[in-house]
Structure formats: structure tokens, C-alpha cells
Image (cartoon, helix red, strand yellow):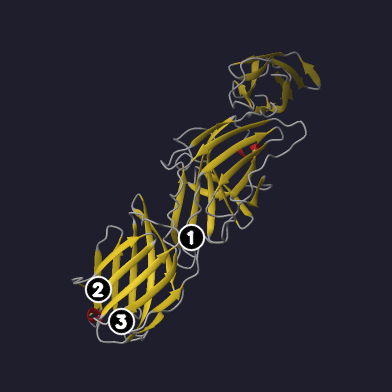
């Protein structure tokens, strides 16, 4: 995923003159967006007995989620050219309450016993107490607090984080208390999808209004993807999806699954899709012609937080959570069209003086099924004269049957098939054996 795609819009009633609407709402669990604990302040103090107390305040959690942890890094010699990327000690606090302690041995961080170290997370604050002697004898050092929250998907794990400070290390000089503020709402967090409202209008536009209560407007590092199962069949497409809409930053990209190459390719222009952005709701609109006027379809949404520099997905919220598809049936039906296939002859090539039948496969645009009834008009000519022909609908095809004139070298003409109040015309030409 790449940064730079994001989009939202206020949930509103679209007004079309004389338009009919169908609307269906789908819910998704709140708080499953993999938001990292949002660090707002780090306080360090030292007591006379040599106990170092660290307090890390978090804005968005009173209770730490089970898949979260904190890494407190210490640059003990205040030298970024030594240690592990500058740090000589690490204390990790897990949501379970466990504490891991690592100390630099000159070549790598080695786990040590966390003797006399304790920690707790209560009312949105992590409090760690550490014997300062465990960190050496330095009276001053640098501190970096990193909160993290993991999310597993199959064999992959996405990790969202917040750094305090965002760059470098906070400098602590003992023994007095020092406070280091951190900007609120700067933690990694995918947009939290809580509801999706789908509607379709008579003019053919389908609207997906996706509620994201944790973002009024989505940041530039967030991407929203809508996957559509156009034919309502799990065995086709990429995991069932044939259409993909990726949106953000006011841009929208529509892709189609190419079965032969088993890959996603950009949709052929003109692309009839648009997105708007405001009010805690992403609204993506797609014209039903992009779905080949299907009467029903499945869809799923994914809101994604990315780090483009590291090429990492940090957090994802899926709707629905089980990886399947919601189902939607169109309320406003598209105008019926007849779709003609390629005409063929029986036998494959006409013979002079012999019967010959031209067949034209025809399907309905609203159901994609072949026609079952209708009327056929035949216009057949050979050697400059009209040839009598009988037209009918049979087995989903329009047919014209006639006897090929004995002097004909070519038979040509057109066939018009009428069904369901509309018609389609196809031309043909066959060389006579």
C-alpha cells in the first residue's frame, strides 16, 4: 500500500429529481482499528533511594488492549553512535503486566532479569519503577518511549506505534523530576469503520457511506479500499472480488481483476467513480455501469494505516471482520438492454442450394441470462436479391433459417431480435461453398 490516498464525506441524503432510493446499513465493531496507545506525556523522576520512576500518559485507553506493549529505550551515554541505534538499555512492558529488561553488552542487547522492577497501567497511565543502578551510574541519559499495538492477519502482523519524542531522545538529568510532552493524536491508527450505508439511485450511482468516528477527515497516510464481488460468486476474481476501489486524498483508483494474468489492472477510461471527504464519513460513489449493471453484488471495506517510507502496513480495520462480503441488492433497476454475442452458422459454412441457419446468442443486461422468448426479423440478401427466411428465438439465440440460392457466392444481411420491450440488431456475412 502507498501513502497519499485518503477520502471522507458527511453522511447525507442525495437529492435527485424523481429519483428512487434503496438504502441498506451494515455495522462493524468499534475499536478494532488497531490504534496504538497515544502517548501524550512522559515524566521521569528519581527518589533519594535511587529508584527511577517513569510515568507514560496515554490519551485513548484507560485499560491497555491485550495486544499492546511499551518499549522504553535508554541512551545511557547520550551518544547516538553507540549501542543499538544509540540505546544501551530497553525495558518492555507488556499488557499482561510482564516486564522484559535488555542491556547492551558491547555488541548487542542481551536480556537480563528485571530485578526489583515493577509496572502497572491504570487510568490511562503506565507507571514503571526501576532501580537506577540497573541502568548504570550515569546521572543523565536520553529516553525514548514507544507505544505499540499488534494485529495479526494470517501469517502477517501489523504493528501501529507512537513515538515520544517523535525524533531523537528526551534528555533526563537527575535527580529532579522532568516532564516531556508529546503531541496528542499522533499515533498510528487505521480509520475505525463502524458502519457502512449503501444506497442506489435511478440515475445509476451507487453510494457507499462509510463511518469513521475516530477521524473527521482521514489523514494522508490512510487508505480506504472497497472490494466488490460483482458476480456474487466466491470462486471467481481475487478471493471473490472482481472490482477494487482505492481512495484517499481526494483521489480514486478503480481496478479490475484480469483472470488470464491473475492480476489487478486499471479500469479502462472513462472511469465513473468519485469520492468526497468530511464529517467522519467516507462516501465513495460508483456508477452501476462499472459493475456491468449487475442486479446484486457483494462488497467488503478495509481501512488501512500505512508507513510508505518503511513500506509497512501498520493497522487495518476490515468490514466485515470475518473476511467475507456484505450483500446488497439494487433497488433501482437499470434499463433493460439486449446483449448480442457473435453470430455463427449451421453448418459452419453455407452451401449453395442447401438449408442454412444463422444463430445470434442474446443475453439480458439485468440478469445476464440468455433470453427465453421474443421475436426475430431477418433481412437476408444474395446475388442482389432478398432471400426468404424464417426467424425465431430458440435456446437463448435468435435464429434466421433459409435456403441458400444455388447461384449465391455470399449471403449477407442483418438480424433483429426483440425481447422484453427492447431490441438488438447484428449484421452478418458468410461466404458460400
Q: Earlier in the sequence, mark 1 or mark 3?
A: 3
Which residue is at 63% across, 40% downward? 207
**Which element type, helix, strand or loop, lies under badge 1?**
strand
**Which element type, helix, strand or loop, lies under badge 2?**
strand
- Residue lying at the far right in this picture: please name it: 384
How far across and how far down the image is residue 54, in percent? 34, 73
Q: Nearer the viewer, residue 146 or 357?
A: 146
Which residue is at 53% across, 61% downward? 221
Residue 94 higher or lower than 169, as above or below: above
* Mark 1 closeness class: few <14, some 14–19, many ≥20 residues within 10 Å: many
Which residue is at 50% across, 69% downward? 183
Determine which residue is flagged by label 2. 102
Tell me, for residue 83, which label it has, or none: 3
Q: Nearer the viewer, residue 12 or 424?
A: 12
Residue 38 higher or lower than 352, as above or below: below
Q: CA distance from mark 1 to mark 3?
A: 29 Å
Which residue is at 55% across, 32% downward? 328
Residue 170, quarter of picture: bottom left
**Which element type, helix, strand or loop, lies under badge 3?**
loop
* Mark 2 closeness class: few <14, some 14–19, many ≥20 residues within 10 Å: some
**Image quadrant occupied by the C terminus:** top right
Instruction: Count all numbered tags in the image, as a single digit.
Output: 3
Residue 65 higher or lower than 133, as above or below: above
How far across and how far down the image is residue 264, in percent? 52, 49
Q: Earlier in the sequence, mark 2 or mark 1?
A: 2
Q: CA distance from mark 3 to mark 2?
A: 12 Å
Residue 297, quarter of picture: top right
Judge left or right: residue 281 versus residue 169. right
Tell me, for residue 306, which label it has, or none: 1
Amino acid at each position: 500500500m502507498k501513502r497519499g490516498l485518503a477520502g471522507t464525506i458527511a453522511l447525507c441524503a442525495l437529492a435527485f429529481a424523481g429519483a428512487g432510493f434503496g438504502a441498506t446499513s451494515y455495522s462493524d465493531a468499534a475499536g478494532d482499528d488497531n490504534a496504538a496507545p497515544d502517548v501524550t506525556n512522559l515524566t521521569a523522576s528519581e527518589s533519594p533511594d535511587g529508584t527511577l520512576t517513569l510515568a507514560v500518559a496515554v490519551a485513548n485507553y484507560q485499560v491497555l488492549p491485550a495486544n499492546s506493549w511499551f518499549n522504553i529505550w535508554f541512551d545511557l551515554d547520550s551518544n547516538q553512535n553507540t549501542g543499538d541505534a544509540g540505546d544501551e538499555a530497553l525495558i518492555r512492558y507488556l499488557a499482561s503486566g510482564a516486564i522484559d529488561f535488555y542491556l547492551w553488552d558491547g555488541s548487542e542487547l542481551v536480556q537480563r532479569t528485571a530485578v526489583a522492577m515493577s509496572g502497572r497501567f491504570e487510568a490511562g497511565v503506565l507507571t514503571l519503577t526501576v532501580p537506577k543502578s540497573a541502568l548504570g551510574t550515569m546521572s543523565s541519559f536520553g529516553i525514548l518511549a514507544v507505544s505499540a499495538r499488534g494485529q495479526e492477519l494470517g501469517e502477517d502482523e501489523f504493528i501501529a506505534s507512537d513515538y515520544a519524542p517523535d525524533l531523537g531522545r528526551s534528555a533526563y538529568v537527575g535527580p529532579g523530576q522532568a516532564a516531556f510532552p508529546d503531541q496528542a493524536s499522533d499515533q498510528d491508527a487505521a480509520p475505525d469503520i463502524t458502519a457502512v450505508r449503501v444506497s442506489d439511485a435511478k440515475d445509476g450511482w451507487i453510494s457507499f457511506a462509510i463511518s469513521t468516528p475516530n477521524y473527521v477527515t482521514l489523514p494522508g497516510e490512510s487508505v480506504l479500499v472497497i472490494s466488490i464481488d460483482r458476480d456474487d460468486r466466491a470462486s471467481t476474481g481475487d478471493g471473490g472480488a472482481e472490482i477494487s476501489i482505492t481512495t484517499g486524498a481526494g483521489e480514486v483508483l478503480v481496478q479490475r481483476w484480469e483472470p488470464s494474468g491473475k492480476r489487478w489492472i486499471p479500469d479502462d477510461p472513462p472511469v465513473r467513480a468519485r469520492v468526497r471527504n468530511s464529517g467522519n464519513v467516507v462516501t465513495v460513489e460508483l456508477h452501476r455501469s462499472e459493475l456491468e449493471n449487475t442486479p446484486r453484488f457483494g462488497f467488503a471495506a478495509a481501512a488501512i494505516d500505512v508507513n510508505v517510507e518503511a513500506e509497512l502496513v501498520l493497522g487495518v480495520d476490515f468490514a466485515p471482520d470475518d473476511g467475507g462480503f456484505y450483500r446488497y441488492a439494487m433497488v433501482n433497476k437499470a434499463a433493460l438492454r439486449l446483449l448480442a454475442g457473435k453470430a455463427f452458422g449451421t453448418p459452419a459454412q453455407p452451401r449453395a442450394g442447401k438449408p442454412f441457419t444463422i444463430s445470434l446468442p442474446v443475453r439480458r443486461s439485468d440478469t445476464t441470462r440468455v433470453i427465453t422468448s421474443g421475436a426475430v426479423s431477418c433481412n437476408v440478401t444474395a446475388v442482389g436479391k432478398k432471400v426468404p427466411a424464417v426467424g425465431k428465438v430458440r435456446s437463448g439465440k435468435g435464429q434466421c433459417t433459409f435456403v441458400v440460392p444455388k447461384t449465391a457466392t455470399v449471403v449477407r444481411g442483418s438480424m433483429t431480435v426483440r425481447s422484453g420491450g427492447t431490441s438488438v440488431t447484428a449484421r452478418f456475412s458468410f461466404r458460400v461453398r
